Amino acid sequence: MPLIKLRTEIAAPPEVVFDLARSIDLHKQSMQHTSEEAIAGRTSGLIEMGETVTWRARHFEVMQTLTSKVTGFERPTYFADEMVKGAFKSFRHEHFFEPTENGTLQIDHFYYTSPLGLLGKLADWLFLRKYMTRLLERRNELMKEVAKDYDTSPIQK
């Protein structure tokens, strides 16, 4: 099972970064290039333990639908979301938040299994791992930008 690990320094307290990471609205903003929208479950604000969100987006020129559910939640240090239904055989995204001298270290662990057996493994090697890494990096860069002004961040509860 492939694992993508990212470490992102964000200049804001863990509580703020935790909320940014579970913001449906920020996620939509970071994925504008894929026309991503939340179409069912929690469609705006901050997703909570046990809640689901269904996303529709264009990836690789194909409209896709994916539903994920928050399955782990320890504010402000950790949460996890897992695919319930979608194009992957499976995925689990773990988000860790550690206080630092300058704010928060956010650590992402994104585990996934592609469908289609050997063909899926070939896709991972050729392009999917890089594509998924870039999506996560894009989201984290927007989080860093929004966190700069965290006292007035437009995060809805």
Image (cartoon, rainbow, N blue to C red):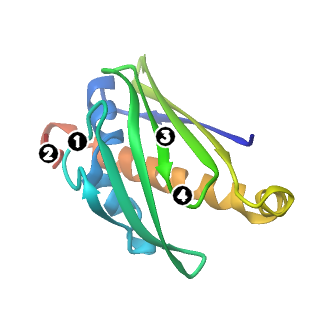
The residue singled out by tag 1 in the image is: 46
Q: Helix, strand or loop at disc 2?
A: loop
- Is residue 3 shown above or below 24? above
The residue singled out by tag 3 in the image is: 82
Q: Looking at the rendering, which quadrant does residue 112 occupy?
A: top right
- Is residue 40 shown above or below 46? below
Which residue lies at the image location 75% right of the left edge and 64% below the top edge?
127
Q: Helix, strand or loop at disc 4?
A: helix
Front residue of this view, candidates 26 and 72: 72
Report the amino acid beneath label 4. Leu
Q: Tags 1 and 3 in contact by the CB under 8 Å rule?
A: no
Q: Helix, strand or loop at disc 1?
A: loop
The residue singled out by tag 2 in the image is: 156
Report the amino acid beneath label 2. Gln
Which residue lies at the image location 33% right of the left edge and 24% below the top edge?
14
Report the amino acid beneath label 1. Leu
Counting residues from the start of the chain, the first of labels 1 and 3 encountered is 1
Which residue lies at the image location 33% right of the left edge and 61% below the top edge?
28
Q: Position of residue 72 (x, y in %)?
A: 41, 25
Q: Position of residue 64 (x, y in %)?
A: 49, 70
The residue singled out by tag 4 in the image is: 135
